[in-house]
Amino acid sequence: MAERVKGRAARLFSGLDPGSFLRAAQDRLRNLARRAAELIRGRGERLWAVLPASVREKLPWLEGRLGFTLVGLVLLVLILFALIIAAGRPAAKQPAAAVFRSVTIPPEDLFLPEEPDFLPPVILEREQRDAWTVDDAESYWYDPLEPGEAEWRERVEQVIDDLLERVP
């Protein structure tokens, strides 16, 4: 059974047309609807033949539609029956207001405690200088162009080109 379903699915999806699956499903639904309509029409014609002649003379407009009318009436009765049953059921019981009691929540559970109101001491290793000499700054200075001047020059030129291209 599973192999048969796999084979059908493979045949449906194997076509180059992506809508082949949808068309096949649509064709099957049309065939099903056509067969159901033929069945209802055939039963309606049989019922029409069984009806007395006096009823057939009074209801000539019902001749080709008797089966569909009866099916519609049966569906309507079933829907009304389901609605009556649903309306007759008691609604879900609402909890009584007395079941819930008010409970106060302490503020400590709702809010975070206050942060401490102090700052840690600042540790100064040396006093701040007003001016730096060349000898003082020499140990912290390095030339960024020393290891790769060409790379930095390309980056700067690229940024300048990008900026100039944006200017109208």
Image: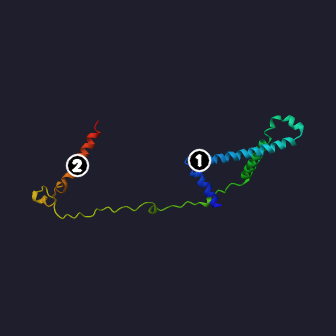
User: Can you say which quadrant of the picture contains the N terminus?
Assistant: bottom right
Is residue 71 in sight in this rendering? no
Q: Residue 158, percent across and down?
A: 25, 46
Kind of residue indicated by mark 2: Glu
Q: Residue 42, percent across and down?
A: 80, 44
Q: Is residue 30 left or right of residue 163?
A: right
Q: Residue at x 77, y 45 (%)?
A: 40
Q: Residue 81, percent across and down?
A: 76, 50
Kind of residue indicated by mark 1: Ser
For disc 2, the neighbor class at 10 Å (few under 14, some 14 to 19, many from 20) is: few
Question: Measured along the vertical axis of the image, is residue 49 above or below residue 129?
Answer: above
Q: Residue at x 80, y 35 (%)?
A: 61
> 160 and 12: which one is in front?
12
Instruction: Quadrant for residue 8, please give it.
Output: bottom right
Q: Circle 1 — which element?
A: helix
> 77 and 37: which one is in front?
37
> 26 and 40: which one is in front?
26
Q: Residue at x 18, y 57 (%)?
A: 147
Checking the image for residue 154, the label placed there is: 2
What residue is disc 1 on?
A: 20
Q: Residue 32, percent across and down?
A: 70, 47
- How many numbered badges does the structure rendering display? 2
